[in-house]
Amino acid sequence: MEHNTMNLTLKVWRQKNNKAKGGFETFNVKNISSEMSFLEMFDVLNEQLVAENKEPVAFDHDCREGICGACSMYINGRAHGPWHHNTTCQLHMREYKDGDTIVVEPWRADSFPVIKDLVVDRSAFDRIIQAGGYISVNTGNAVDANSLPIDKQKADESFAAATCIGCGACVAACPNTSAMLFVSAKVSHLALLPQGEPERQLRAVKMVEQMDTEGFGSCTNIGACEAECPKGISLENIARLNREYISAIMDGDSTGV
Amino acid sequence: MALTGLFLILFLVVHCYVNAQIFWNDGGKQFNEAAHFMGTNVVIRITEIGLFAFLILHIVQGLMLWAKNRSRRSVKYAVTPGNKVSPWYSRSMALLGTLVLLFLIVHLSQFWAPNRFSQTTGNGELDLYARMKETFSMPWVVAVYLLGCFALAWHLVHGFYSAFQTMGLAKHNYKKMIKCVGVAFAIIVPIIFALMPICFYTGCLN
């Protein structure tokens, strides 16, 4: 692909802290290479701001190769930008052309309060995992590999669910700010495996309970989460979570509910 | 939402079947017989109470869900994706449901309420076929009914599949089938309903 450079107008959400009232600030960046990633473009902006003695824009990032789930920008109305099955860090500037205006917002959900600028607090997800996203493993020597037979299809489905990176795009994209896709992925990847069997019912109940405590909205099967998920987590996981939850509630003995 | 919704879907099937009797074009003979059975059978009359209970429950649940979900994003996005990531009707279930409800109020006040009133005051059942013919001679009524069917159709396109998804039944092996049946249902049933006022208005039925 031909390399070119571009000048862009950025409208970025700035917010000093959790309490402050935020607002959009407009920046102009020049000579952005089409080969840069979106975050590298932000690095250029921040270097420019530092040189001007201004506060750089705060944004989350870590691996920058689409596997950690740290980056989280809502770009021109799309979680992680316009590319399908893609994270913000893997969005590249060849998507844009000279003179474009790009609006960048943080994830917006009351359960994901803004910490600063584009950084939001996603610890609600950590607390949901703590509530039930674990398995019991005996200590001691490592168990022989392949000692537990696992159905190939189940292994594949479990693996597909386990690719969830917990970035929160599902919540950001959902008109209801529901976290069902995330919770369903975490419940599914353990529920499908024999290792997840002992806490299976308790897990579904506890994680859903914590999800509600965190104040996420309710799922109405709109499907925006699936469309925006960088890892392509399927809505079928939500159907599975509903099955797990219903059967756990029906069989109240083992869940204490 | 799912359970009450599925019950209301079942009701639509029965209602549609009974009303489709008008298409025999026999001056309402078959239809009035069926309507007489529905209006006087004890089991049906008791089920009717359940139907209203489920309808109200569906409305209350829906409004609560709508209010709750709206309150969870205090600061709204400046730019929204429109229909790029989700279909408009899935996001507009509350609006579509409200339209269906407004239609229902008009509809019940034209047929169900006067008929039950006449029954309870000892004047017997009304000739519902004649009443349909008379009511559907007014263009504004036909327009309201068509709008009601339109809203119902889109409400069903999302609602049918969504009910199965909520109950965890939309597994990959029959998810496609549920979606297809849902869309077919959402097209066929409202079209049959819509044909009733159209046929009376255009004079196909008399």
Image (cartoon, rainbow, N blue to C red):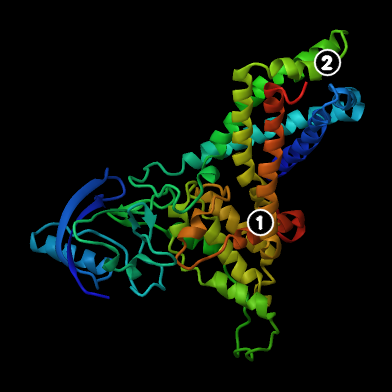
Residue A196 versus residue B1: which sits nearer the camera?
B1
For badge 1, the amino acid type reads: Asn
User: Marks 1 and 2: which is nearer the front?
Assistant: 2
Quarter assignment of residue A151: bottom right
Is A249 situated left or right of B30 in this image? Answer: left
Q: Is residue B121 above or below residue B5?
A: above
The residue wearing badge 2 is: B127
Q: Position of residue A209 (x, y in %)?
A: 59, 53
Q: Is residue A169 above or below residue B90?
A: below
Mark yes or no: residue B163 visible. no
Q: Which residue is found at the position 56% from the left and 49% from the top?
A: A219
Q: Chain of mark 2?
A: B
Q: Chain of mark 1?
A: A
> Same subunit under labels 1 and 2?
no
The residue wearing badge 1 is: A242
For the residues labelled 1 and 2, the Cα–Cα distance comes to 47 Å
Quarter assignment of residue B152: top right
For badge 2, the amino acid type reads: Asp
Rendered-image quadrant of the N terminus of chain A: bottom left
